[in-house]
Image (cartoon, rainbow, N blue to C red):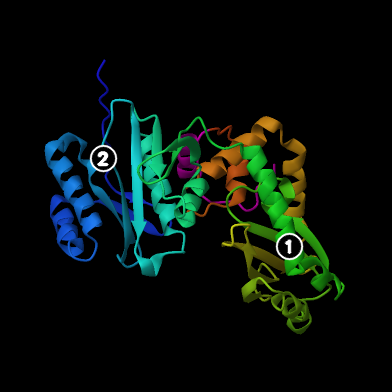
Amino acid sequence: MEFQPQPTNEPELRTARLTLTPMTPGELEEMIAKTRREVPELSRAYEEMLSNCRRFPKDFLWNTAWKMALSKDGAEVGNAGFKGLSDSGVVEIGYGIEEEFQGKGFATEGAAALCAWALDQPGISAVEAETEPENRASRRVLEKIGFQPTGENGAEGPRFRLTRSTLPDLLKLSDENLRRARKVVQEAGILPAWEKIGAVVNPVGSCAMGLIMTHRDVDFHVYLPELNAAQSFQAMTEICSRPGVTRMEFRNLANTPEECFEFHVWFAEKLPDGSEEEWQIDLIQILPGSRFDGFFERVAQRVRDVLTPETRLAILRLKYETPPGEHIMGIEYYQAVLEGGVRTWDEFRAWRAARGEAGIIEWMP
């Protein structure tokens, strides 16, 4: 039987920050004219896309470039696209980001969304890519999405492949990210800074439950007898003096129903290849006896108590398949899997749409 994958009828993809839309033939012609003098090789690539769009109109979405634009203002950050269809059901992706928008995660966010869309199409079994050996940034994008080396080389360099069935070892990845999180917390001096002023610091959230995946954040709840900003800033001043801490935010919610201070710290982790990845450390100082005193610690303990190896893996897989930049509360994954019986990303999307966010914060397994 001849392979006949069918494109979607909804040619617009949205992530947390981006909107991806397929370029029209007219837009491809504009890109050809724009790049002809400055980047001839890129111009020829657009010419080939346009030619294939005209030769294979039914496969238009697989031959054109997809424009990546910021949803908030329409600014174009780059584009991505596939290099046509093959009888094998394997498609190849390419991507590029404008220089002013590089280093902000847009390549990962946009390419991941396009790969997820491709793998959802009937007949598509894998997405492949290749990158120049010295292009560490591009290779890092592929690795973050979940591509695995094939051991083969293409015209540009090593080739990589992504399939639904060859996702990385999620348990190993989670354990590695937990190790990295603990190292970041140690280097930022979180615990000694607060303990020096007599605070009790409790880990909560995904790290406390062994459920950290690709979202690099660490959560703590901090307790002192009173909400005294001057006292709390003693600890935060010490933390902010540490190498690697890049910025800090503070919200005073003492006079709200939450009765807390919120501190958010960003830390630049240095990787072995010389690059950096940013971690967010959330420190919520809660007034003893207030609404959420000890509540999320109890949630974390209850989740740990009821987790099984199968449900842990289900939660990690849902987190892994979440598009980069899409922010979903961790408690939603836990309730969906542990109470709702959700196991796949499609089931999770349907569960969220039906469930809504009402009461999600107060859920206890």
Give the position of the N terminus as an image quadrant.
top left
Residue shown at 67% from the left, 76% from the top: 255
Residue shown at 72% from the left, 75% from the top: 242
Total marks in image: 2
Q: Amino acid at mark 1?
A: Val
Q: Which residues are magenta?
A: 344-365
Q: Which residue is most to the bottom?
A: 230
Q: Measured from the top left, where is residue 362 in percent x and y?
A: 65, 52
Cα gap from disc 1 to disc 2, whole angstroms: 44 Å
In this view of the protein, which residue sits in the foreground, 76 or 159? 159
Q: Measured from the top left, where is residue 341 in percent x and y?
A: 58, 32
Q: Is residue 209 left or right of residue 126?
A: right
Disc nearer the start of the sequence (1/2): 2
Give the position of the C terminus as an image quadrant.
top right
Considering the numbered disc 2 on the image, is that residue within a helix, a strand or a loop? helix
6 drawn magenta:
no
Q: Which mark is residue 62?
A: 2
Residue shown at 73% from the left, 62% from the top: 185
351 drawn magenta:
yes
Q: Amino acid at mark 2?
A: Trp
Considering the numbered disc 1 on the image, is that residue within a helix, a strand or a loop? helix
Q: Measured from the top left, where is residue 274 in percent x and y?
A: 59, 62
Q: Measured from the top left, where is residue 204 in percent x and y?
A: 73, 55
How dense is the environment of label 2, judged by Cα within 10 Å: few (below 14), some, or many (20 and up)? many
Q: Is residue 116 left or right of residue 181?
A: left
Q: In terms of image quadrants, where is residue 124? A: top left
Residue annotated with mark 1: 185
In this view of the protein, which residue sits in the foreground, 348 or 106? 106
